[in-house]
Image (cartoon, rainbow, N blue to C red):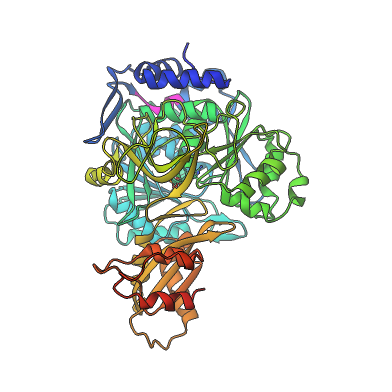
């Protein structure tokens, strides 16, 4: 018997050791006993980090949707797979059983096929958090089309960049979306994006807000009539283990977004196995992850991981503040949620509201609380632990990335003793290493270094779409034979890991990964701007917020700085999305530069952090005099 479900600390250590000593036979057993294969693999693992190349379960044939849906029909056909909770609490929720999911995914898959989508084609999914989002995603997987879900809060420019980068031939969207009391004109955004996407042949539109939108003859189709006339039966395409399952974009510190490519078999095995253990999911539990499917958290832990375990997973369309800040707790009570997974930024926003709206609801169903996306600070950890978990539900602070596909460092609840702000121990099969600046591995405990992973795990991204060289440079070049995460971490006296934050030019704002370069590019498009630099600074709800230093072309610019700031933020919202707007914009005479002309972000970061007395030696700068004036005018 394989160790699919870990229940004690001793067992964790024993299984962990086995997974490191004999990774191939370990993962082979898990794969063999808990999944449905059309054909077994010829080889469990083939890898070479210098190329880099990683293959898991090569030669195996499968379809992930048969694992997430079909195989549950006999035993869980009437069990609820997805609970859809709409934005407006007065609207009716939807409970989709495994059998209904099977039928709806088949119908959708048949519609895709009828519109000419074939195995290997890329399909962009730009849909709000409604059932069609999950169903479209699974339908692509069912026919072997590669889905590229783009978070439906991204701007038309961000959308078109992503559509073109991987040559999507179809876009699936909705007429609009609800966000609390507001609506967003999604179809309008798609139309604008498609002005620069010549490869898109068809747009399928789900009806959500019933707004009057324009449909382009021959290109755009309402989804529902097509679904209604499609068959509820259909065979899943047989896929190779290493066939790409999806592309998901993540920002890098430079250049355009990186389309991380995830493959089928390894991703399935690892997300399912982590889901089972990290949430200690038991049959009949109700699990809720508040993320959007547009992020990796939603892919792995709203859709694939839970469904592969035959779980009941909640999809919530709305926001934590609508109609009031009690909404999350109302939903927990309504569905008797057992596992609740959210982000520190949401916890901080809710904590700020006090506990009145928490006490109104019965949260006694909760057994496990999760956190993901950024370091959780001590205060938020305690608030979550005391008021939501009532000190009874362990908090799993799960560290991972879009690139890792699944949770990498995490406590296992009721197994690993937790410690505030610590993601604690590596999950089964994960071999972290902390590296010093000179490329040496820091052994032993109580060390601080750059977090790397020494050995492949099944759900790691295999490449960046269309740019393997960039994949190699970004993740496998900083340290020999290691995957470099971009994060710093500390290992304490018992071997627990605490993630200390990014060590590159990526800033995590409200749990969203934002590269500084694309934001600076957007600002620099403003005709009055000469140059700009973005840094992060601590923010009590967002974790980090963005501070922009902007130099104008004409120092005597007569225009009102307030208006300029608004225009700059509007440009950022247009180019990237509202999530990348700056909290503070300081107009500067110049930016501190090295003699070779590189902007010294380190100094700007210190100023934004109010660490003025700790700037280090600035005399070697090209223009040390600007530093004082930046300090004097700090916001
Ligand atoms: C970056 C990855 C993984 C899904 C959501 C984010 C930061 C993530 C934690 C955590 C400290 C965390 C890291 C990581 N991060 N989880 N529990 N503690 N930091 O995915 O957008 O790819 O961002 O988020 O800096 O590198 P992502």
Say which quarter of the image contains residue 230: top left
Position above or below: 524 against 328: below
Side of 47 where 388 appears, left or right: right
Say which quarter of the image contains residue 146: top left
Judging depth in this view, the residue of 210 and 497 nearest the camera is 497
- Residue lying farthest top? 1
Residue 525 position, x and y percent, is 33, 72
Residue 603 position, x and y percent, is 40, 65
Residue 371 position, x and y percent, is 56, 42
Magenta segment, which residues? Answer: 62-67
Is there any visible trace of residue 298 in the rendered image? no
Judging depth in this view, the residue of 428 and 188 nearest the camera is 428
Secondary structure predominantly adopted by residues drawn in magenta: helix
Position above or below: 238 against 469: above
* Image point (37%, 48%), residue name: 249
Side of 258 where 510 appears, left or right: right
Residue 285 position, x and y percent, is 63, 28
Judging depth in this view, the residue of 222 and 576 nearest the camera is 576
Is there any visible trace of residue 281 in the rendered image? yes
Judging depth in this view, the residue of 278 and 299 nearest the camera is 278
């Amino acid at each position: 018997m394989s160790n699919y479900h870990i229940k004690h600390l001793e067992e964790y250590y024993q299984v962990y050791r086995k997974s490191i000593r004999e990774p191939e036979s370990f993962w082979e057993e898990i794969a063999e006993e808990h999944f449905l294969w059309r054909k077994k693999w010829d080889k469990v693992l083939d890898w070479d980090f210098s190329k880099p190349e990683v293959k898991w379960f090569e030669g195996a044939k499968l379809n992930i949707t048969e694992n997430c849906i079909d195989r549950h029909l006999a035993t869980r056909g009437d069990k609820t797979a997805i609970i859809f909770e709409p934005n407006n609490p007065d609207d009716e929720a939807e409970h989709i059983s495994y059998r209904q999911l099977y039928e709806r995914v088949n119908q959708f898959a048949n519609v895709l096929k009828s519109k000419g989508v074939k195995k290997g084609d890329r399909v962009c999914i730009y849909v709000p958090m409604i059932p069609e989002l999950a169903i479209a995603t699974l339908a692509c997987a069912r026919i072997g089309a590669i889905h590229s879900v783009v978070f439906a809060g991204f701007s038309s420019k961000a959308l078109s960049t992503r559509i073109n980068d991987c040559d999507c031939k179809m876009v699936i969207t909705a007429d609009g979306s609800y966000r609390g009391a507001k609506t967003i004109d999604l179809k309008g955004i798609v139309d604008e994006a498609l002005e620069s996407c010549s490869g898109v042949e068809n747009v399928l539109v789900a009806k959500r807000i019933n707004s009057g939108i324009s449909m382009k003859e021959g290109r755009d189709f309402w989804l529902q009539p097509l679904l209604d006339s499609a068959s509820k039966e259909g065979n899943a395409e047989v896929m190779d283990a290493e066939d790409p399952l999806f592309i998901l974009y993540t920002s890098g510190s430079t250049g355009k977004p990186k389309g991380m490519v995830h493959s089928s078999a390894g991703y399935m095995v690892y997300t399912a196995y982590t889901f089972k253990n990290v949430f200690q999911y038991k049959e009949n539990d109700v699990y809720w992850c508040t993320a959007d499917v547009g992020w990796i958290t939603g892919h792995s832990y709203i859709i694939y991981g839970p469904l592969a375990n035959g779980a009941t997973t909640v999809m919530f369309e709305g926001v934590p503040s609508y109609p009031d800040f009690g909404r999350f707790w109302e939903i927990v009570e309504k569905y008797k949620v057992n596992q609740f997974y959210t982000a520190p930024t949401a916890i901080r926003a809710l904590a700020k509201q006090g506990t009145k709206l928490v006490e109104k609801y019965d949260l006694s169903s909760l057994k496990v609380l999760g956190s993901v996306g950024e370091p959780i600070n001590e205060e938020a950890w305690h608030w979550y632990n005391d008021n939501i978990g009532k000190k009874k539900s362990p908090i799993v602070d799960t560290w991972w990335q879009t690139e890792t596909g699944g949770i990498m460092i995490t406590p296992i609840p009721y197994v690993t003793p937790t410690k505030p702000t610590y993601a604690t121990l590596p999950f089964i099969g994960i071999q972290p290493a902390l590296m010093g600046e000179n490329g040496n591995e820091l052994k032993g405990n109580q060390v601080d270094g750059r977090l790397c992973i020494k050995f492949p795990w099944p759900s790691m991204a295999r490449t960046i779409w269309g740019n393997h060289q960039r994949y190699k440079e970004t993740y496998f070049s900083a340290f020999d034979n290691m995957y470099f995460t971009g994060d710093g971490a500390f290992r304490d006296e018992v071997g627990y890991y605490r993630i200390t934050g990014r060590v590159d030019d990526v800033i995590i704002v409200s749990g969203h990964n934002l590269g500084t370069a694309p934001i600076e590019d957007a600002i620099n498009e403003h005709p009055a701007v000469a140059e700009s630099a973005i840094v992060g600074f601590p923010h009590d709800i967002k974790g980090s917020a963005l501070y922009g230093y902007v130099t104008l072309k004409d120092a005597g610019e007569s225009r009102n700085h307030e208006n300029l700031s608004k225009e700059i933020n509007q440009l950022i919202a247009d180019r990237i999305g509202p999530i990348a707007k700056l909290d503070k914009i300081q107009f500067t005479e110049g930016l501190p530069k090295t003699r070779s002309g590189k902007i010294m972000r380190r100094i700007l970061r210190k100023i934004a952090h109010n660490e003025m007395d700790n700037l280090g030696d600035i005399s070697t700068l090209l223009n040390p005099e600007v530093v004082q004036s930046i300090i004097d005018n700090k916001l």
